[in-house]
Amino acid sequence: MLRIESVLGSRRDPALHEAIHHLEHHHAVEFVTIAVGDLDRRRLMARTDKGEEVAITLPRDQKLHDGAVLVLDDHRAVIVRAGEQRWLRFSPRSASDALELGYHAGNLHWRVRFDGEDLLVAQDGPASAYAARIEPLISGGRVEMSEVAE
C-alpha cells in the first residue's frame, strides 16, 4: 500500500512538468480518480488506475485537487484526477417557487450554480435524498427535478 502524507504540487507547475512529461513517455504515470465531493477530505483510501491501494492522510493546510502530484520520482508519478461532477437540475414554475427552492438550498448548504432560471445542485449522494428534502415542492408540481451529467 502506498501512503501519502502530502501533496508535492500540481502537474501544471513548471518545476514538475518536465519530469512528469518524461514519465508519460515511459507509461509511468498513474492516476488516482477522486470524486469531486471527496477532494476536500484529508483522509481517504483510493486505488490507482494500475490497481495499487493508496492511503491519503494530508495535513490541515493541504487539499487535494485535480492534477495534484502525490508521488514523483525517477520511476513513476501518481497524480489525482477529479471524477466527473454530477448535477441535479431544479426547474421552478414561478418566481415564488424559485424563492422557496433557493431558501431550502441555502439552508441545506447545497453547492449550487445557476443556469438561466434553473438551479443546478452538485450531487454528492443519491438524487432521491435531494428530492426528499424538497418533496412538497416536487409533488405539488412547483419544481421539476432532473439529473444532468457534465
Image (cartoon, rainbow, N blue to C red):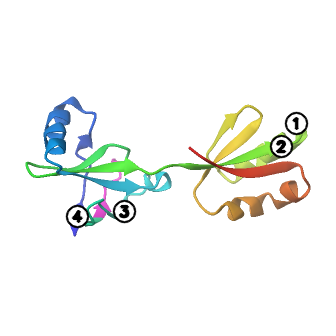
Q: Is residue 46 above or below residue 101?
A: below
Tell me which numbered mark, 3 or 1, is placed earlier along the sequence: 3
Q: Residue under circle 1?
A: 95
Q: What residue type is labelled 2?
A: Pro
Front residue (pair 105, 128): 128
Q: Please give the name of the residue rendered at 29% of the width and 60% of the height, measured from the top-left corner.
A: 48
Q: What stretch is highlighted in magenta?
A: 55-62
Tell me which numbered mark, 4 or 2, is placed earlier along the sequence: 4
Disc 2, disc 1: CB below 8 Å? Answer: yes
Horizontally, residue 49 falls left or right of residue 87, namely left
Tell me which numbered mark, 1 or 4, is placed earlier along the sequence: 4
Q: Which amino acid does label 3 sit on?
A: Arg
Query: Callout 4: few (<14), some (14-19), or many (20+) C-alpha neighbours within 10 Å?
Result: few
Q: Please give the name of the residue rendered at 33% of the width and 48% of the height, measured from the top-left corner.
A: 62
Query: Callout 3: few (<14), some (14-19), or many (20+) C-alpha neighbours within 10 Å?
Result: some
The C terminus is located in which quarter? top right
Disc 2, disc 3: CB below 8 Å? Answer: no
Q: Residue under circle 2?
A: 92
C-alpha distance separating marks 2 and 1: 7 Å
Q: Residue under circle 4?
A: 3
